[in-house]
Amino acid sequence: MNHSPTAARLATRIERLKPSLVREILAVANKPGIISFAGGLPAPDLMPDMRDCIDPDTALDQYGASEGETAFRSAVAEWITHNGLPVAPSQVLALSGSQQGLDLAAKLLIDDGTPVVTESPSYLAALQVFELFGASVLPLALGRDGPDPATLDALLRQHRPACVYLIPSFQNPSGYCYSPEVRKVIAEVLDRHDAVLIEDDPYRSVSLDVTHPMQPICSYLKRVPWIYLGSFSKILRPGWRVGYLAASPQLMPYLVRLKQASDLHTQRPAQAAVANWLRHAQRDADLARLRAGYRLRRDAMQTALERHFGDLADWDVPQGGLFFWLRLRQHQATRSTLDATLARGVVFMPGESFYPGPMKPTNTMRLNYSLSTPAEMERGLAILADCIAAVSAA
Ligand SMILES: Cc1ncc(COP(=O)(O)O)c(C=O)c1O
């Protein structure tokens, strides 16, 4: 008898399923002794104490509603409204991390060949999902204050994309934060066309020294439908996998059914704990402590970068979020130094994977500052700079 395994007939979309460089690098980054600037992990010592918020109700051990817990949906609706986007609890869907929202939005909007606009550079795992579902991604160049609205207008006019995916507050990977003016004009442009806006906002609460308002773009829209994604990963605990979306009422029934088909519902005890935290007297003090802690780390990273990268690269000091985004002055590929830095115990994210489309500037790199101590920053950046200088001298 022949017992050799038969090749499985996989769906054609599997050919588009690219391995994620982040996941591969993160697998190494978690090894003991490695200094990691690679991931977007929050600092464990700055995570709020949640012991008071855990709900012992054993009813939460039972299956629950696909939309999410009633208490969670109403606390989150208040939170989103407080952040500048007025929504009702019925517009909120609990997610197993905001990454799930990208998956649901892609299932809702993207067929094989559907044009989708994303910033360039953009969040790697969003590009991965959109491409898996067959999107033809149209890159929109990103500046410090956001993208050029006229360029977006031209893309919308020419390609009629199904959706536009934007991360306006402390964008991943660039750290850029759209100005209030750009937010308003982008909304006006979107309202002239018929693409759905997917606004991804996981870093809003890691705001360190922005003085202008960061009103969600969705709040300015008058006509086009929108999906707004949020997360508790960066401020509470990523391992709990709790995020949310809010959406235009007309999209909600489809999103709820897609959620149901995907995982029935988000885990209930974590939703209950997050809802309790959102209403807890300590909430704002927890956030203030978190921001103060990240400010210190961001400043320590800036000092170490000035010392080791002052002659090698240009960057902006991020006003929030968890990353520095560097452009090497010499046009060398940062990826080509990864093996050498790894051999010396340091990992980072080469920037090229964040670019959709064929034009991928290779001289960029994303450096996370939330996980390392100042001493590790000093040591890790010295090694990184040394490896980069060695490649440019070769
Ligand atoms: C821009 C962006 N969107 C979504 C996510 C996913 O976050 P979550 O942990 O809520 O799934 C991340 C995580 O790093 C992110 O940077």
Image (tube, rainbow, N blue to C red):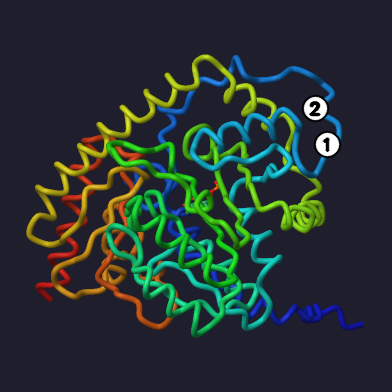
Question: Helix, strand, or loop for circle 2?
Answer: helix
Quadrant in the rendering for residue 329: bottom left
Residue 16: image location, x then y, percent: 60, 78
Residue 292: image location, x then y, percent: 31, 27
User: Is residue 149 toward the left or the right of residue 318 in the image?
Assistant: right
Q: CA distance from mark 2 to mark 1?
A: 8 Å
Which residue is at a point 60% across and 65% down the rendered structure image?
A: 196
Quadrant in the rendering for residue 4: bottom right
Task: Please name whichever residue, 378 or 115, is drawn nearer the observer in this view of the structure.
Answer: 115
Task: Please name whichever residue, 75 or 276, is drawn nearer the observer in this view of the structure.
Answer: 75
User: Is residue 335 toward the left or the right of residue 115 in the image?
Assistant: left
In the displayed structure, would residue 118 be above or below residue 226?
below
User: Is residue 135 toward the left or the right of residue 210 in the image?
Assistant: right
In the rendered structure, find residue 60 and report the number of the disc placed on it.
2
Quarter containing the C terminus: bottom left
Question: Helix, strand, or loop for circle 1?
Answer: loop
In the displayed structure, would residue 338 be above or below residue 370?
below
Residue located beneath label 1 in the image: 64
Q: Amino acid at mark 1?
A: Gly
Count of all numbered marks drawn on residues in the image: 2
Task: Please name whichever residue, 161 or 350, is drawn nearer the observer in this view of the structure.
Answer: 161
Quarter containing the N terminus: bottom right
Residue 252: image location, x then y, percent: 74, 53
Q: Residue furthest right?
A: 1
Residue 393: image location, x then y, percent: 9, 73
Q: Are marks 2 and 1 in contact (CB under 8 Å)?
A: yes
Which residue is at a point 22% across and 42% down the rendered structure image?
A: 301
